[in-house]
Amino acid sequence: QKEVEQDPGPLSVPEGAIVSLNCTYSNSAFQYFMWYRQYSRKGPELLMYTYSSGNKEDGRFTAQVDKSSKYISLFIRDSQPSDSATYLCAMSYDSWGKLQFGAGTQVVVTP
Amino acid sequence: GAVVSQHPSRVICKSGTSVKIECRSLDFQATTMFWYRQFPKQSLMLMATSNEGSKATYEQGVEKDKFLINHASLTLSTLTVTSAHPEDSSFYICSAGGTSGGAHNEQFFGPGTRLTVL
Protein backbone atom coordinates (compact mmCIF):
# COMPACT_ATOMS: atom_id res chain seq x y z
CA GLN A 1 0.00 0.00 0.00
CA LYS A 2 1.31 3.42 -0.97
CA GLU A 3 1.74 5.98 1.78
CA VAL A 4 -0.18 8.57 -0.24
CA GLU A 5 -3.09 7.66 -2.48
CA GLN A 6 -4.46 9.94 -5.17
CA ASP A 7 -6.87 9.16 -7.99
CA PRO A 8 -5.03 9.78 -11.30
CA GLY A 9 -8.20 10.83 -13.12
CA PRO A 10 -8.65 12.35 -15.60
CA LEU A 11 -11.22 14.62 -14.01
CA SER A 12 -13.16 16.62 -16.57
CA VAL A 13 -15.28 19.62 -15.54
CA PRO A 14 -16.97 22.46 -17.43
CA GLU A 15 -15.59 25.96 -17.13
CA GLY A 16 -16.89 27.75 -14.04
CA ALA A 17 -17.47 24.57 -12.04
CA ILE A 18 -15.78 23.70 -8.76
CA VAL A 19 -12.92 21.25 -9.02
CA SER A 20 -12.63 18.92 -6.05
CA LEU A 21 -9.41 16.97 -5.51
CA ASN A 22 -8.35 14.78 -2.64
CA CYS A 23 -5.66 12.52 -1.25
CA THR A 24 -5.66 9.95 1.50
CA TYR A 25 -2.67 8.83 3.45
CA SER A 26 -1.80 6.05 5.83
CA ASN A 27 0.83 7.51 8.16
CA SER A 28 -0.56 9.70 10.93
CA ALA A 29 2.90 11.21 11.46
CA PHE A 30 2.49 13.51 8.46
CA GLN A 31 2.19 17.10 9.68
CA TYR A 32 2.77 19.26 6.59
CA PHE A 33 0.60 19.13 3.51
CA MET A 34 1.03 20.73 0.11
CA TRP A 35 -0.62 20.93 -3.26
CA TYR A 36 1.34 21.39 -6.45
CA ARG A 37 0.17 22.13 -9.99
CA GLN A 38 2.16 20.67 -12.87
CA TYR A 39 1.62 21.58 -16.49
CA SER A 40 2.74 19.10 -19.12
CA ARG A 41 6.53 18.86 -19.41
CA LYS A 42 7.04 21.49 -16.70
CA GLY A 43 8.15 21.39 -13.08
CA PRO A 44 5.55 21.45 -10.28
CA GLU A 45 4.42 24.80 -8.92
CA LEU A 46 3.58 25.16 -5.24
CA LEU A 47 -0.07 26.19 -4.78
CA MET A 48 -0.86 25.63 -1.11
CA TYR A 49 1.19 24.84 1.98
CA THR A 50 -0.53 23.94 5.23
CA TYR A 51 0.46 22.69 8.62
CA SER A 52 -1.70 20.27 10.64
CA SER A 53 -5.48 20.27 10.36
CA GLY A 54 -7.76 23.04 9.17
CA ASN A 55 -8.58 25.11 6.14
CA LYS A 56 -6.56 27.57 4.12
CA GLU A 57 -7.83 29.82 1.38
CA ASP A 58 -5.90 31.65 -1.31
CA GLY A 59 -7.91 33.28 -4.05
CA ARG A 60 -9.87 30.59 -5.89
CA PHE A 61 -8.05 27.80 -4.06
CA THR A 62 -9.06 26.24 -0.74
CA ALA A 63 -7.08 23.50 0.96
CA GLN A 64 -8.53 21.35 3.72
CA VAL A 65 -6.77 18.93 6.02
CA ASP A 66 -8.59 16.39 8.17
CA LYS A 67 -5.93 14.55 10.12
CA SER A 68 -8.44 12.41 12.00
CA SER A 69 -9.55 10.91 8.68
CA LYS A 70 -6.09 11.14 7.05
CA TYR A 71 -7.69 13.02 4.19
CA ILE A 72 -6.75 16.24 2.43
CA SER A 73 -8.63 18.19 -0.22
CA LEU A 74 -8.11 20.99 -2.69
CA PHE A 75 -11.00 22.94 -4.15
CA ILE A 76 -10.74 25.24 -7.15
CA ARG A 77 -13.65 27.65 -7.55
CA ASP A 78 -14.72 29.21 -10.84
CA SER A 79 -12.46 26.86 -12.79
CA GLN A 80 -10.84 28.11 -15.99
CA PRO A 81 -9.37 26.23 -18.96
CA SER A 82 -5.97 27.47 -17.75
CA ASP A 83 -6.48 25.34 -14.63
CA SER A 84 -6.13 22.23 -16.80
CA ALA A 85 -3.06 20.50 -15.39
CA THR A 86 -2.00 17.68 -13.12
CA TYR A 87 -2.42 18.39 -9.42
CA LEU A 88 -0.09 16.63 -7.00
CA CYS A 89 -0.56 16.37 -3.27
CA ALA A 90 2.53 16.05 -1.11
CA MET A 91 3.21 15.72 2.58
CA SER A 92 6.07 15.44 5.04
CA TYR A 93 6.67 14.50 8.66
CA ASP A 94 8.45 17.68 9.67
CA SER A 95 9.74 20.93 8.25
CA TRP A 96 13.07 19.30 7.43
CA GLY A 97 11.59 16.21 5.89
CA LYS A 98 11.47 14.98 2.35
CA LEU A 99 8.14 15.02 0.58
CA GLN A 100 5.95 12.04 -0.20
CA PHE A 101 3.95 12.71 -3.36
CA GLY A 102 0.66 11.36 -4.58
CA ALA A 103 0.43 10.08 -8.14
CA GLY A 104 -1.25 13.29 -9.31
CA THR A 105 -4.75 13.91 -10.68
CA GLN A 106 -5.12 15.16 -14.24
CA VAL A 107 -7.74 17.88 -14.46
CA VAL A 108 -9.33 19.03 -17.71
CA VAL A 109 -11.50 22.16 -17.68
CA THR A 110 -13.55 22.41 -20.86
CA PRO A 111 -14.71 25.78 -22.23
CA GLY B 1 10.54 35.18 -5.75
CA ALA B 2 11.69 31.56 -5.24
CA VAL B 3 12.68 30.93 -8.84
CA VAL B 4 14.62 27.80 -9.71
CA SER B 5 16.17 27.22 -13.11
CA GLN B 6 17.51 24.10 -14.75
CA HIS B 7 19.86 23.69 -17.67
CA PRO B 8 19.61 22.15 -20.15
CA SER B 9 15.86 21.80 -20.60
CA ARG B 10 16.32 18.93 -23.01
CA VAL B 11 19.26 16.71 -23.86
CA ILE B 12 19.73 13.79 -26.21
CA CYS B 13 22.87 11.72 -25.86
CA LYS B 14 24.37 8.44 -26.96
CA SER B 15 24.49 5.44 -24.69
CA GLY B 16 27.63 5.39 -22.58
CA THR B 17 28.13 9.14 -22.38
CA SER B 18 27.76 11.32 -19.28
CA VAL B 19 25.32 14.16 -18.95
CA LYS B 20 25.43 17.03 -16.45
CA ILE B 21 22.29 18.88 -15.38
CA GLU B 22 22.50 22.16 -13.48
CA CYS B 23 19.99 23.45 -10.97
CA ARG B 24 20.16 27.05 -9.79
CA SER B 25 18.15 29.04 -7.28
CA LEU B 26 18.03 32.49 -8.86
CA ASP B 27 16.74 34.79 -6.17
CA PHE B 28 17.40 33.00 -2.90
CA GLN B 29 19.92 30.82 -1.15
CA ALA B 30 18.83 27.21 -0.82
CA THR B 31 20.34 25.22 1.99
CA THR B 32 18.86 22.01 0.61
CA MET B 33 18.28 20.84 -2.95
CA PHE B 34 16.46 17.74 -4.05
CA TRP B 35 16.64 15.72 -7.25
CA TYR B 36 13.67 13.81 -8.60
CA ARG B 37 12.90 11.77 -11.66
CA GLN B 38 9.49 11.41 -13.18
CA PHE B 39 8.32 8.85 -15.73
CA PRO B 40 5.35 9.62 -18.02
CA LYS B 41 2.07 9.85 -16.14
CA GLN B 42 3.77 8.97 -12.86
CA SER B 43 4.55 10.98 -9.80
CA LEU B 44 7.89 12.36 -8.72
CA MET B 45 10.34 9.91 -7.24
CA LEU B 46 12.97 11.39 -4.96
CA MET B 47 16.47 10.36 -5.96
CA ALA B 48 18.63 12.26 -3.49
CA THR B 49 18.86 15.15 -1.10
CA SER B 50 21.86 17.42 -1.09
CA ASN B 51 23.01 20.05 1.36
CA GLU B 52 25.57 22.67 0.46
CA GLY B 53 29.08 21.55 1.24
CA SER B 54 28.23 17.99 2.23
CA LYS B 55 27.67 14.65 0.54
CA ALA B 56 24.27 13.90 -0.91
CA THR B 57 21.90 11.44 0.73
CA TYR B 58 20.57 8.95 -1.79
CA GLU B 59 17.26 7.13 -1.65
CA GLN B 60 17.18 3.38 -1.53
CA GLY B 61 17.78 1.85 -4.93
CA VAL B 62 19.49 4.91 -6.42
CA GLU B 63 23.09 4.26 -7.46
CA LYS B 64 25.25 7.04 -6.08
CA ASP B 65 28.12 6.17 -8.44
CA LYS B 66 25.84 6.53 -11.42
CA PHE B 67 24.03 9.69 -10.35
CA LEU B 68 26.69 12.06 -9.06
CA ILE B 69 25.42 15.06 -7.17
CA ASN B 70 27.45 18.11 -6.28
CA HIS B 71 26.08 21.00 -4.22
CA ALA B 72 28.95 23.42 -4.49
CA SER B 73 27.17 26.56 -3.34
CA LEU B 74 23.89 27.76 -1.86
CA THR B 75 22.60 28.52 -5.35
CA LEU B 76 23.92 25.66 -7.48
CA SER B 77 23.56 21.90 -7.49
CA THR B 78 24.50 19.57 -10.34
CA LEU B 79 23.41 16.06 -11.24
CA THR B 80 25.68 14.04 -13.50
CA VAL B 81 24.29 10.88 -15.06
CA THR B 82 27.37 8.80 -15.76
CA SER B 83 27.53 6.19 -18.53
CA ALA B 84 23.92 6.84 -19.43
CA HIS B 85 21.78 4.05 -20.86
CA PRO B 86 18.35 4.12 -22.51
CA GLU B 87 16.67 3.12 -19.24
CA ASP B 88 17.97 6.38 -17.73
CA SER B 89 15.76 8.33 -20.14
CA SER B 90 13.39 10.32 -17.96
CA PHE B 91 12.32 13.76 -16.80
CA TYR B 92 14.71 14.99 -14.11
CA ILE B 93 13.50 17.76 -11.82
CA CYS B 94 15.33 19.59 -9.07
CA SER B 95 13.84 21.55 -6.23
CA ALA B 96 15.23 23.91 -3.64
CA GLY B 97 14.14 24.26 -0.06
CA GLY B 98 15.14 26.18 3.01
CA THR B 99 14.64 29.59 1.48
CA SER B 100 15.32 32.52 3.74
CA GLY B 101 12.81 32.28 6.53
CA GLY B 102 11.05 29.35 4.95
CA ALA B 103 10.77 25.70 5.87
CA HIS B 104 13.02 23.17 4.22
CA ASN B 105 10.04 21.18 3.04
CA GLU B 106 8.59 24.20 1.25
CA GLN B 107 10.16 23.22 -2.00
CA PHE B 108 10.30 25.21 -5.21
CA PHE B 109 10.82 23.25 -8.37
CA GLY B 110 12.80 23.85 -11.50
CA PRO B 111 11.25 23.41 -14.95
CA GLY B 112 12.81 19.98 -15.42
CA THR B 113 15.26 18.41 -17.87
CA ARG B 114 14.14 15.80 -20.34
CA LEU B 115 16.92 13.27 -20.94
CA THR B 116 16.77 10.91 -23.89
CA VAL B 117 19.50 8.31 -24.21
CA LEU B 118 19.76 6.66 -27.61
Image: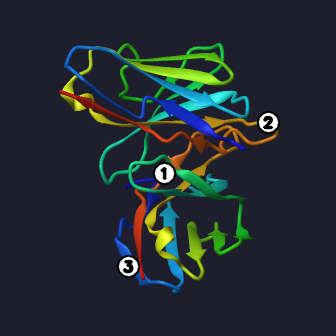
Q: Provide the residue designation for mark 3.
A: A12
Amino acid type of the residue tagged 3 in the rendering: Ser
Pointer 1 and pointer 3: residues touching (CB < 8 Å)? no
Q: Counting other residues with Cα less than 10 Å from the Cα at mark 1, is it few (<14), some (14-19), or many (20 or more)?
A: many
Write down the chain letter for disc 3: A
- Dot 1 or dot 3: first in sequence order is 3
- Whether residue A56 is visible, yes or no, is no
**Which of the pair A76/B118 is nearer the observer?**
B118
In-image side of B88 versus B108 (left or right): left
Say above or below: A3 vs A9: above
Q: Residue at x 58, y 82 (%)?
A: A78
Amino acid type of the residue tagged 2 in the rendering: Ser
Write down the chain letter for disc 2: B
Mark 3 residue element:
strand
In-image side of A69 versus B45 (left or right): right
Q: Which mark is residue A101?
A: 1
Amino acid type of the residue tagged 1 in the rendering: Phe
Say above or below: B111 vs A73: above
Write down the chain letter for disc 1: A
Q: Counting other residues with Cα less than 10 Å from the Cα at mark 3, is it few (<14), some (14-19), or many (20 or more)?
A: few
Q: Which mark is residue A16?
A: none
Q: Outermost residue, right direction? A: B101
Which corner quadrant holds the N terminus of chain B? top right
